[in-house]
Image (cartoon, rainbow, N blue to C red):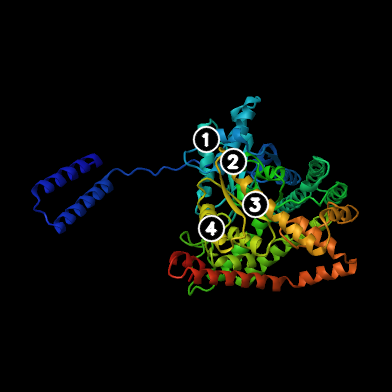
Amino acid sequence: MNMQQTVDTHSSTSAIADLDGNLSAEDYLKHVDGEIKAFENSQNKGEATEHWRDKNPTTFTASQRAHTTVLHAGLTMAHDLFIQSAFRGLGYKVEAMEVPDTDALQFGREFGNRGQCNPTYFTVGNLVKKLKQMEASGISKEDIITKYLFATAGSCGPCRFGTYVTEYRKALRDAGFEGFRVILFQQSGGAKQATGEDLGLKIDSKFFLTFGKAVIIGDILNALMYRIRPYEVNEGETNAVIANAKQRIAKAFETRKGLWKALWQTRKELAKIKVDKSQIKPRVAIIGEFWAMTTEGDGNYKMQGFLEKEGAEVEIQLVTNWILYLFWSAKYDTLQRLKLRGTDKNLKHDTKGSKFALEGVSIRKRLWGLKAVELYVRGLFWTASKVVGLRDYHLPDMDHIAEISHAFYDNNLRGGEGHMEVGKLIHNVVDNTMTMTLSIKPFGCMPSSAVSDGVQSLITEMFPQAIFLPIETNGDGAVNVYSRVQMQLFKAKQSAEKEVMAVLEKAGISKEQFEQQLSNSNINTPLHRSPHAGSCSVVDVASELSSNTGLLTRLRNRLRRTLSTENAQKQTLGIVANVSRSYKNRHKGQTEDVVKIVSPV
């Protein structure tokens, strides 16, 4: 009996039952169950059909390395360039692709599935666009397929990120490049390819150290660029210095010599940029979905540049923060699994086991190993920052971010930025580090939408002084997005102006006097960083200038702030707890569901 026959029989039987009207409810339900069982049996008796599997060409051996070019993209322009050069220094042929633009989006929409998120269309379309350009330049399809491959990150989670590699293959197949290799580098599983020969992409300590160094130095250069550029006197000077620095550092990576010298030369060039730090600019933090907040192209409407043109100082999220979050997650999960009464099978020993299992694992060794790697990352970041001139930049304390966000977004929920997005907003508001927070996410991004449209609305209600704006990107509607940003930015500018004037009034000086004193001070230099005093940089500068303390006093104050970090974190936790308790009491018996979010079991 085929499906159509079953449907017809069921329909006719139901019609007879309706005409007869004598079947009881119990008999009718038994009849329905019988029909379902009959259909199930008919399907089981049918001819066995082989399950469809998507072809997944990933073979890349050591013998192919000399004539195979690895394409990659996905981070900022500085990161992609440094990763390209660093791996060229290890003997690989690597080429960084351009930042995805609207043309890439159109390729993604043309060859990709419907209903995908913004990063999928941009990144998949960017690869198809690149291959089409290569073909148009005279390279044959056969050479493109055999002599090139694309390497990208991948993972699972409550979003479409786990299906990216399938989207790449589907788009490549429909675009005429079936068989083109896409190597998926898992966040938690290494390179997802293996053959009987030596691997073409050798995943070892040298690989991770090289990758980490390229990412960290890219982060530092980006942080300096966004810190200096809003206050430059001569427009374009910062971009010119940064462009020279990128080429210098890239050459050092590729030749594997002179890296620290290149960083020091970059410091000297940055120090020559003329700045005016008396300009009142709100400090705007960009948070949200990883790719959308990181890319510097049309994927987020070039939001970083737009904010600067509108008179803001942009605080970007570093890729190093994401690496630290991965370390924190591994440590947290290990400690949580340690509380279980039993130990599940390890995937290495049992195909039905878990890759997270603790069977045969030394807990102490794993935790110490994670701590050692984290210390290395933080140590390398601190050292490189000192050399290139990024002063007083603090990587986030992941335990603290987890603590202040857990009451609103459980630390066990993963996907996207997890609880970090909530923790960052709370930190920005309670500790008064940012004037405004902008959350960027792709249209329909499930993890980030749940946070920015759901949980963050609770945070902004509890902390009404927060200037927070969530926006969605889909490649279209830039004018509407810009308009929304401008409205919130207007409020942020007013807030920054009010805060600066309050500091000057307290110090007993006018804005003109402040500008005059600053012009003759060494504070008004590109690499100087004033101690944190408010939500924007001018507040920090004005507070330092008005204090008029000597060098020893400033050093003593800096040391005191460093030693009091733990107390400051406890104070933040106390403020969050008090506000949560007050909110719960005000809404007792009215919004039970919200209260459950505030105080999870």
Residue kind at label 4, given as amino acid type? Ser
Give the labeled residue for mark 1: 109
Spatial CA distance of label 1 from label 2 is: 11 Å
Q: Establish if 414 lies above or below 252.
A: below
Residue at the image position 81 percent from the left and 59 percent from the top:
542
Left or right placement of residue 205 versus residue 113 in this view: right
Question: Residue 320 shows which numbered tag?
Answer: none
Residue kind at label 1, given as amino acid type? Arg
Give the labeled residue for mark 2: 123
The disc, 4 or 1, on the residue closer to the chain's N-terminal end is 1
Instruction: Give the class, few, some or many, for how many residues have Cα within 10 Å of label 4's Cα (few <14, many ≥20).
Output: some
* Image x and y of residue 567, in percent: 70, 74
Regarding mark 4 in the picture, which secondary structure is present there?
Answer: helix
Spatial CA distance of label 4 from label 3 is: 18 Å
Depth order, front residue of 259/601: 601
Residue mark closest to the camera, 2 vs 3: 3
